[in-house]
Amino acid sequence: MHDTPATAPPPRLVRARMDLHGPALLALNTEYLTWVFAEMARQFGALPAALTQQPVSAYAAAMLDKVCADVPPAGCFYLLERPGAGGQPATIVGMGGLRRLDAQRAEIKRLYLRPDGRGQGLGARLLAQLIDDARAFGYRALCLDSAPFMHEAQALYRRHGFEDAPAYAGTEVPGPLQSQWRFMQRAL
């Protein structure tokens, strides 16, 4: 018998390490980017050439170190892991991280929950942890980018003090999409 999300143990935040979690990080980043690229193609009609020159899995692999490999005090990356019950293995329900932009600013990256992890306050919990980490690491501001179709994420960010801002140096968003993207920041 499998536990349902309502009766399963609550997920725990696990600080990801590339040496231990590399395959899981790659799989989850590929899943996230597959969804993002599909939505972008639907919304914009086509993806910029820089994103279509390789399969999504290759793009995710190429970006993995840039997005997930910072370690404290530069940054960190978390997996939300639901412990297994009744001998079942743990399952990953989400991810998110903090990446150094410069000495004063960090960037929220890849805040993503799988459908079975949504609606449980996990995104807010993860975002609050990342904000706390950024303060502890000595950053003075946080930046993020959000696709125009990520309305729920944008509402979460606004509830946590993020405000609209111009595009920032170091963003992953290709230049041709930046005018249609949403960039946000908050002081710490």
Image (cartoon, rainbow, N blue to C red):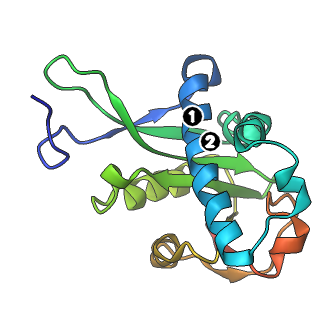
Residue 1 percent across, percent down from the top left: 9, 28
Determine which quarter of the picture holds residue 170.
bottom right
- Residue in the image at 68% along x and 59% along y: 37
- Residue in the image at 76% along x and 42% along y: 55
Dot 2 corresponds to which residue?
A: 30
How many numbered callouts?
2
The reply to whether residue 96 is visible in this rendering is: yes
Identify the mark at residue 130; answer none if there is no mark. Answer: none
Residue 102 percent across, percent down from the top left: 83, 53
Q: Nearer the viewer, residue 22 or 76?
A: 22
C-beta proximity under 8 Å, tags 1 and 2: yes
Q: What secondary structure is marked by label 2?
A: helix
23 relative to 74, above or below: above
106 relative to 42, above or below: above
Number of residues whose C-alpha sits closer than 10 Å to that of mark 2, classed few (under 14), some (14–19) or many (20 or more): many
The reply to whether residue 181 is visible in this rendering is: no
Q: Amino acid at mark 2?
A: Thr
Q: Nearer the viewer, residue 48 or 175?
A: 48
Q: Nearer the viewer, residue 21 or 176?
A: 176
Determine which quarter of the picture holds residue 58.
top right
Number of residues whose C-alpha sits closer than 10 Å to that of mark 1, classed few (under 14), some (14–19) or many (20 or more): some
- Residue in the image at 54% along x and 39% along y: 28
Q: CA distance from mark 1 to mark 2?
A: 5 Å
Residue 142 percent across, percent down from the top left: 67, 63
- Residue in the image at 58% along x and 56% along y: 35
Q: Amino acid at mark 1?
A: Ala
93 relative to 178, above or below: above
Dot 1 corresponds to which residue?
A: 27
Q: Quadrant of the C terminus?
A: bottom right
Q: What secondary structure is marked by label 1?
A: helix
Residue 159 percent across, percent down from the top left: 45, 77
